[in-house]
Image (cartoon, coloured by chain):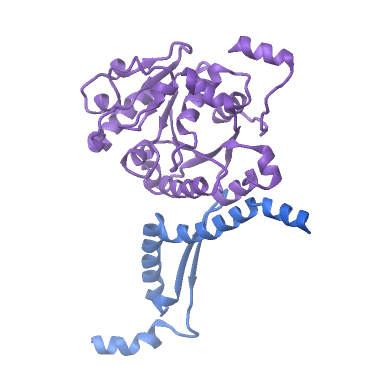
Chain colours: A blue, B purple
C-alpha cells in the first residue's frame, strides 16, 4: 500500500497536463484573439439577423486551435419558425 | 531571399538566446549567410553567448535610428565566416526602438542574408512584439514545465494576431523547440512529455533539445554549443533542428551523450 502511494505521488506530469488544459481553454477564450472573436460575433450576428431573428445572448463564438487547422465554431440558437417578419413585424410598425 | 525567423517564448530563461546562437551557427555552418539580432534592449546577452561582447561598437538602435550604417554595426563571427551578430543596445530608454526603425533595419538585413534570426526578449512588451513584428516564421522555445507552456500559448496567440503577416491574413508559421528536456524524468511521469506539450500547444515540432551541462559550458566560453562541442547531444539536436529549418526531412530523435572513450576523445578534438 505504501509502495503504491509512493508510486502515485511521483507521477506529477498528468496533473500538470490537466491543469494546463483547463487553464488554457479559459485563457484562449478571453485573451488576444478576443478582438477577432468579438468582431466576428458582431458581424455574423448582423448578417444572420437580416434574415432570421435571434437572441444575441444565444450566440456563441469559439475558436479552437488545432495542429493543421483551427476550428471557428459559431453556435446560434434560432427560435422555431421565427422569421424576421414574424418577430420584427411589431417593431417595424412602431418605427414607421 | 531571406527568411526572417523570431526566436520567442514569453517566459524568460527557457533558452531563447542559447537557441538563437546555436541555430544561427548551425545554419551558417552549412554555408548560408546568417545574422543573429538581439532585441533585448537594456539587457543584451546574445553578444556574450556569442563571445563578441568586447567587439560591440554600434548596435541595433544606432542602425534603427540612422546613427550608424548597418555595415558598421554588424559583427562578423571569428569562427564561422558567414555568421554575423547585430547586438542590442544597453540603453535604458524603452522607447528607443521604433516600429519604423526596426522595419527599415529588417528590410536591409533581408537583402544581405539568407537568414535573419531575431532573439526576442522575454515578456510581451514592446521589445518582444517588435522582435516578432516582421517575422516570416517563429520558433517558440518551451520547457516541459507548466509556466513555460502557458506563456508559450500566450505568445502563439500574439504571433497569430500582432505580426505583419497575421494582419495581412496570412498564416504565421510557428514551430516548437522543446528545450531542457529530460527523458528519464518524462519517462517516470515527473515531467510533461513531448506529446503532452505538443497536444496542448498544437504547433509542429522543430526539435527536442536534451537538458545538458554542455549548454552552460558553451555560454561560459562564449561560443554557440553547435560550435563549442558539435558532437554533444544538444549540438546534434540543434543541428537537426537547423536542417529541418532548411526543409530537410530529419527523423525526430532525442540525442544522448555518447559515452565511449573513442567519441570522448573525438569530441574533444572536434571542439
Q: Is residue B11 above or below residue B81?
A: below
Q: Residue at x 45, y 76 (%)?
A: A58
Horizontal side of B156 relative to B231 (left or right) equals left
Name the quadrant of the N terminus of chain B: top left
Compared with B112, B201 (above or below) is below
Q: Quadrant of residue B185?
A: top right
Quadrant where the image shows the C terminus of chain B: top right
Instruction: Specify whether residue B243 is in view.
Output: no
Query: Where does the image place residue A75, in percent across and percent down from the top left?
Result: 49, 70
The structure residue drawn at horizontal position 46% and vertical position 58%, both measured from the top left corner, is A27
- Residue at the location (66% across, 33% down)? B254
Q: Where residue A44 sits: x, y (%)?
A: 40, 67
| Residue at x 63%, y 50% (from the top left corner) | A13
Q: Looking at the image, which is closer to me, A10 or B252? A: A10
Q: Is residue B74 left or right of residue B213?
A: left
Q: Is residue B192 visible?
A: yes
Task: Locate residue B264, reporting x and y percent.
Answer: 68, 15
Name above or below for residue B67 compared with residue B188. Answer: above
Callout count: 0
Left or right of residue A62, residue B72 in this image? left
| Quadrant of the image occupied by residue B56 | top left
- Give the x, y percent position of residue B92: 25, 33
Q: In terms of depth relative to the viewer, which is nearer, B34 or B253?
A: B253
Amino acid at each position: 500500500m505504501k509502495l503504491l502511494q509512493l508510486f502515485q505521488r511521483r507521477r506529477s506530469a498528468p496533473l500538470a497536463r490537466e491543469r494546463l488544459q483547463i487553464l488554457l481553454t479559459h485563457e484562449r477564450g478571453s485573451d488576444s484573439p478576443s478582438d477577432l472573436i468579438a468582431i466576428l460575433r458582431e458581424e455574423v450576428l448582423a448578417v444572420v439577423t437580416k434574415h432570421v431573428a435571434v437572441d444575441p445572448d444565444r450566440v456563441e463564438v469559439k475558436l479552437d486551435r488545432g495542429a493543421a487547422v483551427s476550428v471557428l465554431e459559431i453556435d446560434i440558437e434560432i427560435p422555431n419558425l421565427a422569421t424576421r417578419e414574424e418577430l420584427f413585424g411589431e417593431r417595424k410598425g412602431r418605427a414607421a | 531571399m531571406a527568411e526572417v525567423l523570431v526566436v520567442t517564448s514569453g517566459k524568460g530563461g527557457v533558452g531563447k538566446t542559447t537557441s538563437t546562437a546555436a541555430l544561427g551557427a548551425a545554419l551558417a555552418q552549412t554555408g548560408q549567410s546568417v545574422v543573429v539580432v538581439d532585441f533585448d534592449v537594456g539587457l543584451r546577452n546574445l553578444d556574450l553567448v556569442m563571445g563578441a561582447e568586447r567587439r560591440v561598437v554600434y548596435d541595433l538602435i544606432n542602425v534603427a535610428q540612422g546613427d550608424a550604417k548597418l555595415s558598421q554595426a554588424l559583427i562578423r563571427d571569428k569562427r564561422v565566416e558567414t555568421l554575423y551578430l547585430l547586438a542590442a543596445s544597453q540603453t535604458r530608454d524603452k522607447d528607443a526602438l521604433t516600429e519604423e526603425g526596426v522595419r527599415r533595419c529588417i528590410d536591409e538585413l533581408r537583402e544581405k542574408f539568407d537568414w535573419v534570426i531575431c532573439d526576442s526578449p522575454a515578456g510581451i512588451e514592446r521589445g518582444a512584439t517588435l522582435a516578432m513584428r516582421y517575422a516570416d516564421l517563429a520558433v517558440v522555445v518551451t520547457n516541459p514545465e507548466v509556466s513555460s507552456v502557458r506563456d508559450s500559448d500566450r505568445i502563439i496567440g500574439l504571433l497569430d494576431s500582432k505580426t505583419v503577416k497575421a494582419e495581412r491574413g496570412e498564416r504565421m508559421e510557428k514551430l516548437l523547440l522543446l528545450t531542457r528536456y529530460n527523458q528519464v524524468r518524462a519517462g517516470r511521469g515527473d515531467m510533461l512529455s513531448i506529446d503532452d506539450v505538443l497536444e496542448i500547444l498544437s504547433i509542429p515540432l522543430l526539435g527536442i533539445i536534451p537538458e545538458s551541462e554542455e549548454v552552460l559550458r558553451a555560454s561560459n566560453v562564449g561560443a554557440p554549443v553547435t560550435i563549442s562541442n558539435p558532437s554533444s547531444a544538444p549540438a546534434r539536436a540543434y543541428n537537426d533542428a537547423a536542417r529541418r529549418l532548411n526543409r530537410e526531412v530529419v527523423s525526430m530523435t532525442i540525442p544522448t551523450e555518447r559515452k565511449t572513450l573513442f567519441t570522448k576523445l573525438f569530441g574533444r578534438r572536434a571542439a
